[in-house]
Amino acid sequence: MARGIRHTVGMRYFPPRRIVCLTEETVETLYLLGEQDRIVGVSGYAVRPPGVRREKPRVSAFISADIPKILALEPDLVLAFSDLQANIVADLVRAGVAVHVFNQRDIAGILAMIRTLGAMVGAAERGDQLARGFEERLAQVAATPRAAPKPKVYFEEWDDPLISGIGWVSELIEIAGGEDALPKLRFQQAAKDRIISSDVVRDAAPDVILASWCGKKVVPDRIRQRSGWGDIPAVRNNRIVEIKSTIILQPGPAALTDGLDAIVRALWPESTI
């Protein structure tokens, strides 16, 4: 049987037994579903749960992968994310590997990914339960009484050029009781379409700046020293907060849990969440 073809007998479906995950959110989701034994290879960025770095071989970065190493693992399914991994996907498809590419860019998409992945591994009910648990938690945080007015928040995904936050981050800011300073940009999926000028942020005058420089350590002094930013309320009141990219820039469980909690703490320092 060709590598990567999930076989059926009659109408019976046999879930994939050997899965390679090229991004971290599918790794964490499979662990939460109790299906981690199906994982045979992971992204080098996978750190949740912590044991994954010891338990699973690393086979890829984000836009590059060790194709021979992946093929040697004989996966019957590879999970990828977005057009940014298109070149990796093309190589795997040409090698006869079954690939599923997710493209979630908002909270609804994250929840759909969890349910879809659950169904793919024969754990549809557990996938739905996991997603419903996250939905309930998000609703609970959103319903928490907060002081008025809402703090205006600028989320910075990269510093040079300046790139604002993607859709799910904007939604999480609102769930946490804040107001996205640049809400229209949430609909721009590609990072290049969320590049902004320094003046745009200065004119928005955010009360809080959240920064997560995609794996690079945030340096608040660089933000403070930008021309004209001294009068921004967030800078003036020293409300510049780093959020680790591992908990906010992966469109999966981490963002809906630890990522959201970090936003709440940044906006409401006295909150117990």
Image: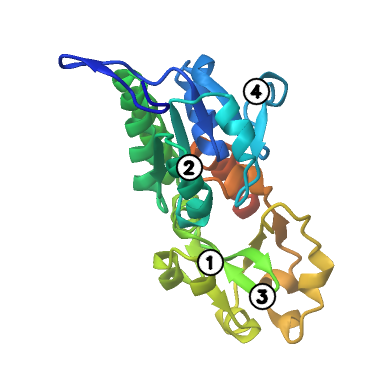
Q: Secondary structure at mark 2?
A: strand
Quadrant of image for the N terminus: top left
Residue type (three-letter) at the residue carrying disc 3: Pro
Q: Earlier in the sequence, mark 2 or mark 3?
A: 2
Question: Is 83 rendered above or below residue 237?
Answer: above
Pointer 3 residue: 161
Position of residue 23 in the picture relative to residue 52 (left or right): left
Mark 2 surroundings within 10 Å by alpha-carbon count, few (fewer than 14), some (14 through 19), many (20 or more): many
Task: Indicate the quadrant where residue 119 lies.
Answer: top left
Q: Earlier in the sequence, mark 2 or mark 4?
A: 4
Alpha-carbon span between mark 2 and mark 3: 26 Å
Labels 2 and 3 touching (C-beta < 8 A): no
Pointer 2 residue: 80
Mark 3 or 4: in front is 4
Residue type (three-letter) at the residue carrying disc 4: Lys
Mark 4 surroundings within 10 Å by alpha-carbon count, few (fewer than 14), some (14 through 19), many (20 or more): some
Task: Indicate the quadrant where residue 237 lies.
Answer: bottom right
Q: Earlier in the sequence, mark 3 or mark 4?
A: 4
Question: Is 62 rendered above or below residue 224?
Answer: above
Q: Which mark is residue 191?
A: 1
Q: Secondary structure at mark 3?
A: loop
The answer to whether any part of residue 3 appears in the image is yes
Picture residue at 32% right of the left edge, 33% below the top? 116
Alpha-carbon span between mark 4 and mark 1: 30 Å
Residue type (three-letter) at the residue carrying disc 1: Ala
Q: Residue 98: image x %, image y %?
A: 39, 34
Number of marks: 4
Q: Which mark is residue 56?
A: 4
